[in-house]
Image (cartoon, helix red, strand yellow):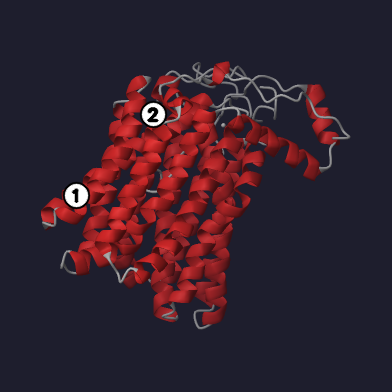
Amino acid sequence: MSSAAETAGAGASGAAGPDRADAAPAGAAASVSKGSGALPGRLWNRDFTLLWQGQFVSSLGKQAFGLAAVLWLKEATGSGTIMGFVMMAATLPAVLLGPVAGVAVDRFDRRKIIAYTDLAGGLFVLLAALLFLLRPEATGLLIATVFAVTLATGLLDTFSQPSIGASLPDLVPKERLEAANGLNMAGVQLAVFGAQGSSGILYALLGAPLLVLWNAATYLYAGFTELFIRVPKSAAKDAEREARLAALHPFHRFRLELGEGLSFLRGHRGMRTLIVVFALLNFFISPVLVVLPFFAQDFLGLGPAWYGYLMASYGLGSLFGYLAAGALPFRGKARELAVNGCLLAQSLLMVLCVFWKAPAAELVLFVLIGLSGGVLNVNAISAIQLATPPEFRGRVQALVMTACAGAMPLGMAVSGLLFDLSGKNVALMFGASAALTLLATLGALAVKDYRGFLAGAEDASQVAPPAGGAPTAGA
């Protein structure tokens, strides 16, 4: 989701059936009764730990591969166009296939989706590593390989991230969901720090082939360990409904299940408004991201290294925000104040960046922007998870991912064009981003259902399924 939400998965009765996770095997911890759907009694239980460490390790590999690919493409081609297409390939599947992934996440075993997508990613990246090792002179083939693997892993993430977001509420105590989301997002941020801090050195020492091989190993390790996660089963499926669904043409069944997810969101204006706000924030934060190198060098008059310092400050603030929001969870009216307070704070902080130009002050401001974004992310994602019945979580999480993944690239393209047309006016772009974020926040605050949703007016246990009843074979 942007400074507001980078990680939706980081992290939606009676419609599509409950997830098909396997029952806990004999000897499972007493906190998860076999097939009962009971939640664990503590945060760092066996299954959450398996999920967290798997995501952390695979994120390290993904970040290392991404940086290795960028460095290799620059070295091998020097083409910004090729690099841009490769970066686009990473986000394109989420934009185009997010709704498809959401239906699959709610229909099939989420645990298997999480594990199998990491295992498949490991095999794709392993193939790329072998080509880098065996055919280092085949530049054209390797460019195509980097593009294909980036597209493939982006496609796999499109299915795995909603699965993680949909499963997390079933793996931890309800009152610790914010902590789980905060730790999950913090793990990804730590992986980013680790990869950014080491990949340049490792690339120089080892080269692209061994870095790609490292990525394959992290994927395969994560996928193997995630096979041992146990997700408590929800209530038994309606056998008659399942039989009618199975009789439908696959396209008609997909259309029906997707329609149920959209109907759920249409019936919950508060949640829908929050998702729209996050998509808009992704779009409106884009001017800052596009002009940040110009802001550091031309506007502040600092060296090129300061672009990295500002990004690191933002990342550090995000990490603090994730951990703080998890350690001190907000519920009820406090959550409403926290989310909207962070949105308003980000607008103010972006304006201060333009006027308070001392280098040390800029570092502090970017830490605070990251901090507010981290708190915002954890609270908003947790609110959506808590208010969404388990059988809809995959579709809701995927729709959040699609909205946000589509908004940021579009915002960057528009921002780049407007930046050039404005005569590279950095202050104008920062001010426009702050003003538009403020307008989106104020517009959302005018919606009573939005305020009520954040304050906890909606609860998954009280949510009615979309009307329409069970499908028929002739639907």
Which residue position holds label 1?
A: 352
Residue type of the residue flagged with mark 2: Glu
Instruction: Give the left or right position of residue 114, taking residue 346 as reference.
Output: right
- In x, y percent, where is residue 465? 66, 23
The disc at residue 178 is 2
Would residue 47 be found to the left or right of residue 324 on screen?
right
Q: Residue 416, how many percent across, how many down?
A: 39, 66
Q: Please report the residue visible at 36 percent of the width from the left and 71 percent of the height from the top.
A: 420
Q: Which SS class for mark 2?
A: helix
Residue 238 on image: x %, y %: 75, 21
The answer to which of 287 and 464 lies nearer the viewer is 287
Asked if 151 appears above or below 465 in the picture, the reply is below
Residue drawn 66% across the image and 41% down it: 104
Measured Cα–Cα span from mark 1 to mark 2: 30 Å
Kindly indicate the quadrant of the structure image that contains residue 41: top left
Quadrant position of the C terminus in the picture = top right
Residue sitting at 62 percent across and 22 percent down?
234
Of the pair 219 and 383, the residue shown nearer to us: 383
User: Could you tell me the amino acid type at mark 1?
Assistant: Leu
Q: Earlier in the sequence, mark 1 or mark 2?
A: 2
| Residue 224 appearing in the image | no
Can I make out residue 182 in this image?
yes
Q: Is residue 175 above or below residue 186?
A: above
The extreme bottom residue here reads 137
